[in-house]
Image (cartoon, rainbow, N blue to C red):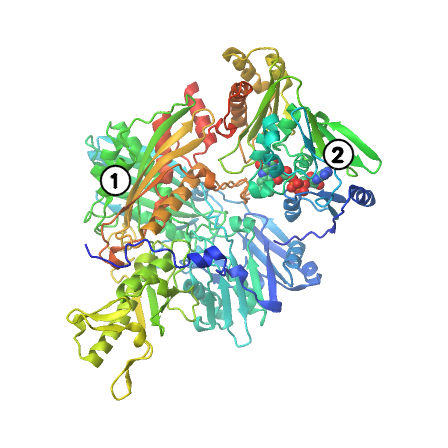
Amino acid sequence: MTDYRYIGKSITRIDGREKISGAAVYTDDIDFGANLLYAEIVSSTVAHALILNIDTSEAEKLEGVVKVFTGKDFPYKFGLYMKDRYIFAQDKVRFYGEQVAAVVARTPQIAKMGAELVKVEYQELPAVLDQMEALAEGATILHPDLGDYPHVPWFFPKPGTNVAHWRKTRRGDLENGFAEADHIYEETYEVPRYAHCAIETHVAIGKFDYSGRLTVWSSSQSPHTQRNLFAEALAPMGLSQKDIRVITPHVGGGFGGKAGVTMEILPAALATKLRGYAVKLRWTREQEFINTYQRLGVVAKLKLGVKKDGTITALDHKIYWDAGAYVEYGANVVNAVGLSAIGPYRIPNVSIDSVCIYTNLPPGGAYRGFGYSEMLFGLESHITTIARQIGMDEIEFRRKNAILEGDKTAYGAAMNPNGLLEAIDKVTKAIEWDKEYKSTDPNKVIGKGFSLFWKAPAMPPNASSSAFLKFNEDASINLIISGMDIGQGYQTVMAQIAAEVLGVDPSKIRVETPDTDRNPYEWQTVASHITWSSGNAVKKAAIDARDQILALVERVYHMSQDSLYLEDEAVKCHNQASFNLPLRSFVVEGIATKDGSYRGGPINGRGMFMPEFSSASGDPDTSQGGHPNVHYTVGAGALILEIDKDTGKMKVLKAAEAIDAGKALNPDLIKGQITGGLLQGLATVLYEDMRYDDKGRLLNPNFTDYKIPTAMDVPDEIIPIIIEVPQPDGPYGARGVGEHTMLPAAPMIANAVENALGIRIRSMPITAEKVAMAYKKHREQ
Amino acid sequence: MAFSHSFEYFRPGTLAEALSLLDQYKGDARLLAGGTDLAVHIKENMATPPVVIDVKRVTDFPGSRVSPKALYLNASTTFSDIVNHADLRKAYPMLWEAARSVASVGIRNRATLAGNICSAVPSLDVAPALLCYDAIVHVASSSGTREISIHDWFISPRKTACLGTEIMLGISITAPAVKHSGIYLKQGRYRGEDLAQAGLGVLITSDLQYRLAYCAVGPIPFRARAIEAVLNGKVLTAELISSAKAMVQDTVHPITDIRSSKEYRLHICEVMLERGLKAVEQRLNGAEFDSAEILGG
Ligand SMILES: Cc1cc2nc3c(=O)[nH]c(=O)nc-3n(C[C@H](O)[C@H](O)[C@H](O)COP(=O)(O)OP(=O)(O)OC[C@H]3O[C@@H](n4cnc5c(N)ncnc54)[C@H](O)[C@@H]3O)c2cc1C
């Protein structure tokens, strides 16, 4: 095993002091002076309607209102993977809460008062609030122009229907596979929509100055992608990428909700019509719930065939996604899962239909896990049940079918190296799976739940990262990159990578938040790809700097580069122990020679990474042939659940989760992800639930009735387990773990409830109420 | 956070000033205590009072007094004041537990008991305790003071017997003459702060008198007198508890809302009754435990 100085060490977060002390600047903290204006959005009060008229006259009369805008001012489309939405609604609104107009005023209060004065006249259309209804014959069509929408080549919309994309994956011979099975089990599982609930709501400020430059400050996971989408949408106004600058200060949580572009397009667009002013828009908590991306809802129909010995012979997995009114981002969630709905199993005969369906609910989009949580809820519930049905231990069943290196994925590419079996074994041991757990309280029972998980980054094949690295006089370093530290510790880990290559302590490396004018390109901080992808770019930038240093020393001192190495901020030599050239003596100023002239000069490194092997061009009918996913990260989890039989209240007494990080660059940060991710996953299964009325209005756009866990709801004990089977193309063998940690939570709970009470709940969330009522019914029967 | 509603704001320093402002703006003024209820409503345009009179700086509310025999809590009393009061906890455990179950520390530092009962929402947590202890609400207007029994206080959701020209001064309780104990059980959706799906206060005395009051399961909080009648004078047995439980369906008439279905509320009311009776009896006999665990956390 290689001995590393900084890699694999739990270095304290380099942004910790800044955040703890309050020094960290967030978007809303920035002072724009007297020329700051405030925007308030007029939102649709109906789920589906034609806009007949918008009367802005009363609002315009209000003192302090600067201007009122409607869709007419911005007839421009935008979108990441499919351009299916407008900056403001044009002739139609498609969800309750959609932006219809904006009032820009001198103060937030006047803007809000103005927005209440804008009168919108609607002619209501039938609202389609359920994806299965949207698929039915004669359903109202939300996007009659679907056939005209530009989209990435790997999407397959069905114009004339509400199907925005249909990912089909076919392998082997399904009929034969089911014929070979001794036992077949079919069931349907349902998962509702969820909200990210980042503590910082969305906020952005746009400023268009008299030189024709548009600057947008935003709380975002995707500065470069935002710049590109703004440029695409605002191109008719003569703006190009170079004219647009996106600055993203620290972010107060993202979870996928701040990927791509949602409300940020509004202040960006508004600013272009208010030259010289800064225009700020900040979502309230209610707007945060209603008009950003939401996690998509799912109805999954599963049919699994197994032999008596537990071998899986066939899987038919049909997943119907409630993707909302616009699917410009959400359709890729559907796509990702459509390629991966076999779970981490070796299955020879597979059919997957992952169907992206328009509904008159808010747009679905990225959410930590990118569809895999929803898919795994059904699949891992199903696996536990089918193992029991054939009288096999569920862990043995999983071990037997676990996907191994070289096995074929659903789209036919070989599975990457992974430690799935090790994860299963370590979790089983840590949770003491074979132990009899029994409550001493007669009102309570205890159950055990297990689940495997996997997930791949879902990205375009050419998603890339880049890095600049510059040395300062004292050999400290500015690392200039464009990923976002959304709590995962990105900045720290990138500093560790540069530190390892250059022999400079991470505490001497400063990583700043991005500014697209100055920081090099990064696709987005999503998909759990940033450690892997940006890490590779940073490593290359550091190697580039090191190569420059060693070449310079070779040139000046005539020493072979092969004999030189970097350590303790100095160049050292394997052959000459006394040689010690401090970096600070030359990395900016160069090395002085005898005649008083200097050699070298400032050392600046640059690095780039793109997965050149990736390709999204599989066969549209089977998905065979391409290499859409760069790799999968796998793991296993188990928990011990105490349930009050009468109230249904549940408490996780102990949970263990193992994840194959390839290489844990910073073990404490991974443990943090396991704890936080598990808690977020448990919240989605135990408490959270977006509830809509029959008009498509969200009933709980607040924390009073949308429950996210508090410190009191954390499991008593969480055992984080790190597995390290290196990812060959990852920096020091690392691969991503950020999203994955929440994936097993829901099926673990469902499986534990069945284990304890003998009832199988197939719809999320699994609240105390649902458990109590199901058990009451079960007892009465 | 922007409020679109504008209002005139007064912050009187004395009761007399506050009352004269109320008279001056008859019906147009709303009193503001901790604001944890009213401010939220103004923000959401659910309340649009032309005038807001902040009573936080009123210094001459009659003083609070706590003894095992009787208690008076004035309108300035916050939930944190109650939670931090060791003597109150000992003498009136049900009231203490209700106060502790309200929201979280930050809200409790501002939220007052007065604002709680004046808000008169169906789920208000201190109502069962006040109903079980037969509290008296003291109110004042410019023409004098009057006492209102807590049993006459709640009229309908968000409506109390307190008139628009009156200020609530405080509440008083006289403890039962014999040894007694109480408990408040609150069913929420998780362990963290939550509004009640159902709440139950149970009071027991050493001469076997029982008082039961529910909140969050009807338009106003109420005493379950029919069930009390079945229990009074009797020693708790499994059989007695079953017959009490059997009456819940006819006594409690909850609705379905975002927090719970009607069916679950009914079911929980039965579970609470059984566990509450058993626990309060143990407490009367000196047992010490955290009531938050009784329903499974
Ligand atoms: C996050 C959160 C969590 C909450 N959780 C709970 C909970 O768990 N349980 C619960 O019961 N409540 C809860 N509440 C509601 C609220 O906090 C309580 O009702 C609180 O006691 C209100 O007190 P206040 O002093 O803030 O009242 P305010 O908001 O100031 O006033 C409330 C009402 O009382 C009137 N009022 C105030 N003082 C007087 C007076 N002296 N005379 C006459 N009228 C008066 C006001 O005009 C207003 O109508 C919660 C609120 C929030 C924001």
Q: Amino acid at mark 1?
A: Lys
- Place of residue B129 in the rendered image (x, y in percent of width and height, measured from the top left): 63, 27
For the residue pair B61 and B237, the one nearer the viewer reads as: B61
The numbered mark at residue B84 is none
Residue A685 vs residue A44: left or right?
Answer: left
Q: Amino acid at mark 2?
A: Cys
- Label 2: few (<14), some or many (≥20) within 10 Å? some
**Which residue is at a point 30% across and 49% down the rendered structure image?**
A339
Q: Is the C-beta separation of discs 2 and 1 under 8 Å?
A: no
Residue at mark 1: chain: A
- Tell me where residue A695 sits by quadrant: top right
Which residue carries the number 1 mark? A426
Which residue carries the number 2 mark? B162
Residue A28 vs residue A341: left or right?
Answer: right
Residue at mark 2: chain: B
- Tell me where residue A384 sits by quadrant: top left
Whether the residue under disc 2 has CB within 8 Å of ligand 1: yes
Q: How many marks?
A: 2
For the C terminus of chain A, which image quadrant?
A: top left
* SS type, badge 1: helix
Q: Is residue A347 visible?
A: no
